[in-house]
Image (cartoon, coloured by chain):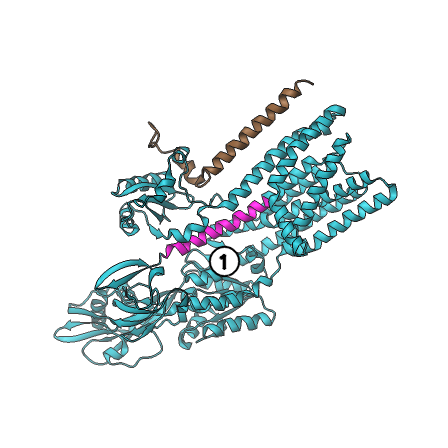
Chain colours: A cyan, B brown
């Protein structure tokens, strides 16, 4: 867990001295960011920086190994696309990052702020502790008073600065008439400082300055851990979003211009190359191709595209270049309208109360009542206001939730760190707790359980001669089915036949001449065959019937293991897909999933998830497409793979970074273990209170006992959390 | 005990120097790339003179 959040602008003192601010204002400079997933050592840093600095037009380049990124300042006309081949030629994979999408973590003010307060609390508490130890070991009279006064002089400014987050939180809670964990904290701090100052001015024996400071320090440490865990996840999630640089090619008087998607307007002509994603909703006005709609609908069968067809943002163009006229841009596209559905579904989830919240609800009133009772009891017994107030303050300090404040963040940090190493990104604060409760798992098919890459299933059914012709035709095309066919045939040792004049007809297939005969490989209707529900490419070899090459979607690595492990753990596994019945039934059979639903519309998916929820099930939804987003948001907890659409990733609590699905089952186990640790931590913290509180109420507590109880409970809780790693 | 009159201010001043140094490193982004920085010391580039 060494990941830090801010991309480095200047990480060495020498660069700080350089006026890099002016570079941002000057129009002669552009800033680019590249993601370099492959770098891992010193040699990589030097090689990349040397190569980039030597490239014409680059003013400076700096690699950040922690974030695996390079930040480049260059001439404004230099584009990241020019630099990627340069780095790939020296063996480093590089992707462009959208700096605008990274902006949120660029200046991490909140984290820096917390760290500064933490440092002040640490400095002050160590100094005061030094003085307190002298007092506890026997300093008396004038020396003790002097030490107390010095402690007070250090403590007051330090607390006023360092404990501000608690003051602010407590005030917001009190203003709306609620109690949270921060209210007893603030009350304890204020009461401790007030009584200690009063005691000091009367040359009293006990002052709790050190306790107030260590309390602040431990609580700030908990806050910082909590913040860091979420910030690391957030910055990794943002990097995923930044990898999809929103650019489109606008056609203007026959010329092509690369423009940001945000600049597109209704009526613009946009060129979408094969393999590209539709940036906006529109209508095809030129070109023929096939469209992959699986991210929107879950269908694996490509759709034929010709002028006049309406397309939606998010669909992928497969074969030929298409020119579309934009009919809806930005917020109006169907991609964005989906987010409204998500917003509605999400309101249900915010009702979840975390373990920390429910602990605070029990704890805060209890502490206040206890300390008020101690005050009232002692005041009525002795009529000594000073003594009663001192005891009330001691009760508040000793019960103060040092360990409770650390109990949850220490465990979630350890668990998130462990899952992060296995390629899972925990985005939501309470995601782990919710994951631990899951008893039903709903999978989407296309792109989630399957990799979205087709595989030939019936290669052996064809004659050698036909295979050779098919290979020759397939090799010239970049259509996913052709690519899969080529790979399968090559692996089987097939050599291409001598087919001449091969031309690709976008949207239909490829054709050529073989021994004077016209041969075709492509869509069913084009070669004169009947279309059926399974994905297929048809071959017309010029003699006899057209033959079908059937394809099935390859399973994602780890899909079978994940399903099996989840079933072994006693969870219900369901498959809900928008794809055709045949394809879904086949996959469910292969994975051994008994319950499946096919041809589900997006609304069906979320309705089913909601129905399961109403039956009292805790649903984990795993999905990647736009058609899953509403279901992802409606589920108790949700996971999406990194290849998912941005909208789906935003809607889910956990993002799977790798291709492998098997960490899902492990995540459930880790989450259960983490929740158990959190409960254990609460019990440990309570146990310390059970021992120390009677002492405090009896008036036997000294600052030394308070300091010991506080430190040991905090340290035990942190150590217990570390057992998760 | 008059030695305390020197020792306590000295300890406080030394501590605040450390705190100020931490603030300086924090403000100048020195914790942005802990992994990279720990490896950069192994590089022999710019060993003769500082990077311009």
Q: Residue drawn 74% across and 32% down?
A: A200
The answer to whether residue A525 is above or below residue A710 is: below
Q: Is there any visible trace of residue A499 in the rendered image? A: no
Q: Residue drawn 51% across and 31% down?
A: B21
Q: Position of residue A215 (x, y in %)?
A: 65, 41
Seen from the viewer's position, the closer of residues A201 and A635 is A201
Magenta-tinted stretch: A221-244
Residue under pointer 1: A654
Q: Residue drawn 39% across and 43% down?
A: A64
Q: Is residue A369 left or right of residue A594?
A: right
Q: Secondary structure at mark 1?
A: strand
Seen from the viewer's position, the closer of residues A546 and A242 is A242
Seen from the viewer's position, the closer of residues A24 and A699 is A24
Q: Based on the displayed image, in which of its 4 quarters is residue A244 positioned?
A: bottom left
Secondary structure mostly seen in the magenta stretch:
helix
Q: Position of residue A521 (x, y in %)?
A: 23, 73
């Amino acid at each position: 867990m060494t990941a830090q959040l801010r991309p480095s602008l200047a990480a060495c003192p020498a660069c700080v001295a350089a006026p890099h601010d002016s570079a941002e204002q000057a129009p002669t400079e552009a800033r680019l960011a590249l993601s370099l997933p492959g770098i891992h050592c010193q040699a990589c840093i030097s090689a990349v920086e040397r190569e980039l600095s030597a490239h014409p037009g680059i003013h400076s380049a700096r690699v950040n190994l922690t974030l695996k990124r390079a930040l480049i300042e260059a001439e404004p006309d230099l584009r990241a696309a020019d630099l990627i081949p340069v780095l790939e030629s020296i063996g480093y994979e590089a992707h462009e990052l959208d700096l605008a999408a990274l902006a949120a973590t660029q200046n991490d003010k909140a984290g820096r702020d917390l760290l500064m307060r933490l440092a002040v609390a640490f400095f002050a508490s160590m100094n005061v502790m030094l003085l307190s130890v002298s007092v506890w070991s026997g300093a008396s009279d004038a020396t003790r008073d002097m030490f107390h006064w010095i402690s007070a002089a250090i403590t007051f400014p330090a607390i006023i600065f360092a404990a501000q987050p608690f003051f602010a939180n407590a005030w917001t809670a009190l203003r709306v008439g609620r109690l949270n964990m921060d209210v007893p904290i603030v009350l304890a701090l204020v009461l401790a400082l007030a009584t200690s100052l009063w005691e000091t001015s009367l040359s009293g024996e006990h002052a709790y300055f050190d306790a107030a400071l260590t309390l602040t320090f431990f609580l700030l440490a908990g806050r910082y851990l909590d913040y860091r865990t979420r910030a690391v996840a957030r910055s990794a999630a943002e990097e995923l979003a930044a990898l999809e640089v929103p650019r489109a090619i606008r056609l203007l008087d026959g010329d092509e211009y690369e423009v940001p998607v945000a600049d597109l307007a209704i009526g613009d002509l946009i060129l979408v190359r094969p393999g590209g994603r539709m940036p906006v909703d529109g209508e095809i006005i030129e070109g023929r191709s096939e469209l992959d709609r699986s991210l929107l609908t879950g269908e694996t069968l490509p759709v034929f595209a010709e002028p006049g067809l309406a397309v939606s943002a998010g669909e992928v163009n497969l074969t030929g270049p298409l020119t579309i006229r934009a009919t809806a841009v930005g917020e109006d596209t169907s991609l964005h309208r989906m987010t409204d559905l998500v917003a509605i579904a999400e309101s249900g989830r915010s009702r979840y109360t975390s373990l920390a919240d429910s602990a605070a609800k029990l704890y805060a009133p209890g502490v206040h009542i206890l300390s008020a009772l101690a005050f009232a009891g002692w005041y009525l017994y002795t009529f000594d206001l000073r003594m009663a107030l001192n005891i009330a303050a001691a009760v508040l300090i000793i019960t103060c939730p040092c360990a409770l404040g650390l109990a949850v963040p220490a465990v979630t940090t350890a668990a998130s760190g462990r899952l992060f190493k296995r390629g899972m990104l925990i985005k939501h604060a309470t995601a782990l707790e919710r994951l631990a409760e899951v008893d039903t798992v709903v999978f989407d098919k296309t792109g989630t359980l399957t990799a979205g890459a087709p595989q030939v299933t019936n290669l052996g059914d064809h004659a050698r001669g036909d295979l050779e012709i098919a290979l020759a035709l397939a090799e010239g095309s970049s259509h996913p089915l052709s690519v899969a066919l080529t790979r399968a045939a090559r692996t089987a040792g097939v050599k291409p036949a001598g087919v001449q004049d091969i031309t690709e007809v976008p949207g239909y297939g490829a054709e050529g001449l073989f021994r004077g005969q016209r041969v075709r490989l492509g869509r069913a209707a084009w070669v004169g065959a009947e279309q059926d529900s399974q994905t297929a490419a048809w071959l017309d070899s010029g003699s006899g019937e057209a033959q079908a090459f059937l394809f099935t979607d390859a399973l994602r690595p780890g899909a079978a293991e994940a399903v099996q492990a989840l079933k072994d753990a006693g969870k219900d596994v369901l498959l809900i897909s928008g794809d055709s019945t045949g394809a879904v039934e086949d996959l469910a059979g292969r994975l051994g999933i008994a319950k499946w639903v096919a041809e589900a519309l997006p609304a069906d998916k979320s309705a089913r998830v909601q129905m399961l929820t109403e039956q009292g099930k805790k649903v984990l939804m795993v999905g990647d497409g736009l058609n899953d987003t509403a279901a992802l948001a409606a589920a108790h907890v949700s996971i999406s793979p990194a290849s998912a659409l941005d909208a789906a990733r935003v809607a889910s609590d956990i993002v799977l970074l790798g291709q492998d699905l098997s960490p899902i089952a492990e995540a459930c186990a880790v989450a259960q273990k983490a929740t158990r640790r959190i409960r254990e931590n609460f019990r440990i913290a309570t146990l310390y209170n059970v021992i120390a509180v009677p002492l405090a109420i009896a008036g036997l507590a000294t600052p030394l006992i308070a300091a010991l109880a506080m430190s040991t409970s905090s340290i035990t809780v942190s150590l217990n959390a570390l057992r998760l790693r | 005990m008059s030695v305390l009159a020197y020792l306590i201010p000295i300890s406080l001043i030394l501590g605040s120097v450390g705190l100020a140094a931490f603030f300086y490193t924090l403000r100048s982004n020195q914790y942005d790339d802990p992994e990279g920085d720990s490896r950069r010391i192994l590089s022999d580039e710019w060993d003769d003179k500082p990077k311009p």
